Amino acid sequence: MSVIRTPFLLAAIALLPAMQSSPAWAQHPFLSEQQWSNLRREASGTASYENLRALTRLHRVPATPEFDQAANFILERAKEYGLQDVHSEQFPIDGQIHYGLMRSHVAWTVGGARLWQLEPHHTLLADWSTDPIRLADYSHSADVEAPLVDVGAGTLIGDYAGKDVRGKIVLADGVLSGVQRLAVEKYGAAGIVSDMPNQTTAWSGLDTSIVRWGHLDGSLPQGFAFMVSRATAADLRAQMLAGNPVVLGAHVEADVGPGHWTVVTATIPGTDSSAGEIVFSCHLDHQRPGANDNGSGCVTILESARMLNRLIGSGTLKRPRRTLRFIWGPEVEGTMAFLSRHPDIRRSMRADVHMDMVGGDPFKNKSVLHVTETPWSLPTFITDIGASFAESIRDAAAVYTEDGSHEDAAVVENRGGAPGTRNAFIVDETPYAEGSDHDDYDSSTVAVPSLYLRDWPDIYIHTDHDTLEQIDATKLRRVALLGAASGYSFASLDGAQSAQVLPFLASRAQQRLAKGFQRAQLLAQEATLAPDVASFEAHNLMAQMLRRDLAALQSFAAFTQSHPPELAASMAALEAQAATLNGWLDSIAAMRGVHGSTYVPASRTAAGKRVPQRIAEFGPLTFQNDDVLIDRLGPERVRKIKLLNAGSSRLLNAQDSGAIYAYEIVNFVDGKRSLGEIRDAVAGEFGPISLELVGDYLQACEEAKIIAFR
Ligand SMILES: [Zn+2]
């Protein structure tokens, strides 16, 4: 884009910093300008970057010796930084022990592994000692020399037609556990060479040198897999096509069995031990190097901890009322284990700052940092606080990139020659998305609202290219500041701040409602829905948005245990705004011939009036290595759940979104909402869905004894 600078634009640009230096960059109403600049000065991207350098040397698969080395590194740093109650805890796992609803997984110990090509050329393809990502997790011991057979994807029976793979090694690019089930379990192959592609992004397939991290099914008793790049696999296929049989020699020494997960925790005590805790979470596991996923989140909550502890310890920041807790463990599994062992801490948690991938240089790994909202089942004000800090840094960084001014406010990590970039801070706020420990915190039986910070996409996630090379020390510094400022605000927040905080929250709620109206408007005009149904769904969306944002305002009162005098007026203003927007929807409906609907919503039918309540242990129903419904009902029954089978309904308009509906349907079960009200809630959040699909899913949950109907 070429820019012609008119005198007007020049004037506007020149004015911008002066206009914005206050109040947009000062942190009113949560932090004073002095507090913000103290936090900013203390935040170090270099400290995070150097800690990350150490983590990326370790292959951090959960319940392995190298994971424990990583845990020990964090433990030692936390002690060195002067945090309190620094310790690690071990949680036994054997595939049977449960933590909350979640069944534990297995441990894995590797003595060594190598893959050689023996014929027609002699060359080394993989060596655990130098490149552990090339051995798939939960590979079993083996010592074989065998021909290689190409089975395509290897996940369908047809892939094996006319091929004898018994005792041989298969080359496959399908999902690894599926290949294991057919090639190894069913057809007797010795093992697998996999070039399974990485998670799909716009850049997929462009770089064929990438080696993906792979996992076998830890519950299966045999098989091994070596991961190779697409280029290596193409070369092997070309040799076989040319009529040269390929013979491989595979040697693996490994044990799969019982073991333990390790979780490290530390605190910065608040002044009032009964006031609850603010938790910082991340996940310490993943393949080497795993720089962005998730070494970055681990070192960044550690940096937030270091800077807060130093500033609070020195008296520069007032010690907050609530305790700050930091947790490093295996993804989801460590969180569930810790919350299960410490129900007292679980119940005392008031908010979570969760970091999973926060350091990517966007011009390298193509990432956008998303401040991710909580699901609508857990309305909260905390996302607004995190998002406003992110916006402050973003706006200052934008001015800095354009004219070089305001370097301090832009939070650039080039101090003393440090290696951070001068990049813009590419950050936005997005709706709830699944896929990390926040799923547990946000789920209804834990109900700790999570400020979830995540890079997405990352074209190198789960590969050998997720290296320190892709990481920007400037971004690490910005996110450490964002995390520390948010966590400190949550820990300090007091009802006495309501005169500043509630107008801030109310104005953001009004912006959300206005923006959400555009979705409702499209729904009201939706040609594939009958006019009265479209009108109902559009009004339902408005009703759900209003419910959520009223509850978000009320969450401030509950959090601070206060009765803010501004609350009623804030809520009334939001309701008035919704009434106006609903009137506009009525006009659209009238244009489509709807005058006083005859449509009977699901919540008023007999089937829609049944009320489910939760009866099982705490936690959501799906985890890294466990699916509660499959565990309790078996895969056959689960395949019959309509919601989880895409394309089952015209009304389920978003493909592959069954899992996110399922997560929220269970969250909305509170012993008060009827089936029809739960339908309305998820229909507003994700799009119209039939009562039948919701009922069919909850019936499976009833069979699995997760819920009971009152
Ligand atoms: Zn992750």
Image (cartoon, helix red, strand yellow):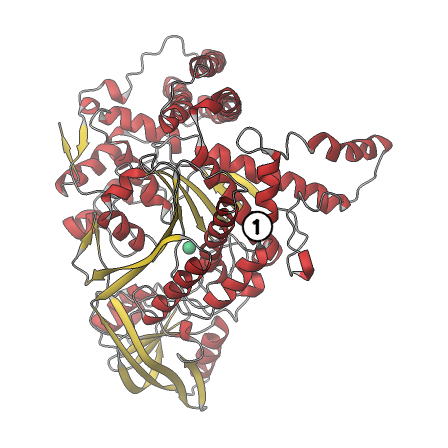
Q: Is residue 205 visible?
A: no
Looking at the rendered structure, the kind of residue marked 1 is Ala
User: In the rendered image, which quarter contains the N terminus?
Assistant: top right
Give percent across and percent down for residue 218. Answer: 25, 66
Instruction: Residue 571: name its quadrant.
Output: top left
Q: Which residue is mark 1?
A: 43
Ligand 1's quadrant: bottom left
Q: Nearer the viewer, residue 605 or 273?
A: 273
Q: Nearer the viewer, residue 270 or 244?
A: 270
Give percent across and percent down for residue 598. Answer: 31, 12
- Please give left or right for residue 618 compared with residue 467 in the image: left
- Please give left or right for residue 55 compared with residue 698 in the image: right
| 391 over 169 or under it: above or below | above
For label 1, the SS is: loop
Q: How many marks?
A: 1
Q: Nearer the viewer, residue 697 or 441?
A: 441
Q: Nearer the viewer, residue 161 or 591?
A: 591
| 101 over 120 or under it: above or below | above
Give percent across and percent down for residue 216. Answer: 30, 67
* Residue at the top extreme, as displayed: 596
Q: Residue drawn 58% across and 30% down?
A: 28
- Please give left or right for residue 638 compared with residue 159 in the image: left
Instruction: Residue 196: name its quadrant.
Output: bottom left
What is the crowding at mark 1: few (fewer than 14 residues within 10 Å), some, or many (at least 20)? many
Instruction: Residue 624: name its quadrant.
Output: bottom left
Q: Is residue 290 visible?
A: yes
| 470 over 579 or under it: above or below | below
